[in-house]
Image (tube, grey):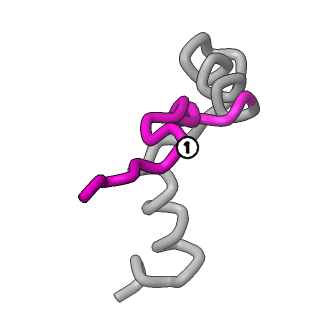
Amino acid sequence: MQIALPNTQTFEKKEPLYTNEELHLLHQLENGLVKSTSHEDVMKNLKQVLKLDEI
């Protein structure tokens, strides 16, 4: 009895983790080329918009 293996490669080239657009944005963020807002500031603003800070 013979076992036939498939002809297709099982270890194909992996896709990159990030797209080129995401890599470009990461580069801009890391080098201060794009304005970003901290998580704390976003949450503070969200509380104000939802009027959760008035309680």
Query: What residue appears at the point 71 percent right and 16 percent down from the top-left corner?
Result: 33
Q: Is residue 54 above or below residue 24?
A: below
- Dominant SS of magenta comes to loop
User: Is residue 24 a member of the stretch shown in magenta?
Assistant: no
Q: Is residue 3 above or below residue 53?
A: above
Label 1: how many Cα within 10 Å (few below 14, some 14–19, many 20+): few
User: Is residue 7 a member of the stretch shown in magenta?
Assistant: yes
Is 6 on the left or on the right of 26, as rendered? Answer: left
Q: State the image coordinates of residue 2 (x, y, percent, origin top left).
A: 29, 53
Is 46 on the left or on the right of 5, as rendered? Answer: right
Query: What residue appears at the point 52 percent right and 72 percent down from the top-left corner?
Result: 48
Q: Which residue is mark 1?
A: 8
Is 54 on the left or on the right of 30, as rendered? Answer: left
Query: What residue appears at the point 64 percent right and 25 percent down from the top-left corner?
Result: 23
Q: Secondary structure at mark 1?
A: loop
Q: State the image coordinates of residue 26 (x, y, percent, origin top left).
A: 60, 26
Residue 41 vs residue 2, the one in the foreground: 2
Is 40 on the left or on the right of 26, as rendered? Answer: left
Residue 53 vs residue 25, the one in the foreground: 25
Q: Quadrant of residue 8?
A: top right
Residue positioned most to the right:
21
Give the position of the C terminus as an image quadrant. Answer: bottom left
Residue type, numbered disc 1: Thr
Magenta range is: 1-20
Residue 48 vs residue 19, the one in the foreground: 19
Residue positioned most to the left:
1
Q: State the image coordinates of residue 35 (x, y, percent, origin top left).
A: 67, 30
Query: What residue appears at the point 44 percent right and 41 percent down from the top-left corner?
Result: 10
Residue 14 vs residue 41, the one in the foreground: 14
Q: State the image coordinates of residue 40 (x, y, percent, origin top left).
A: 39, 50
Q: Is residue 30 above or below residue 13?
A: above
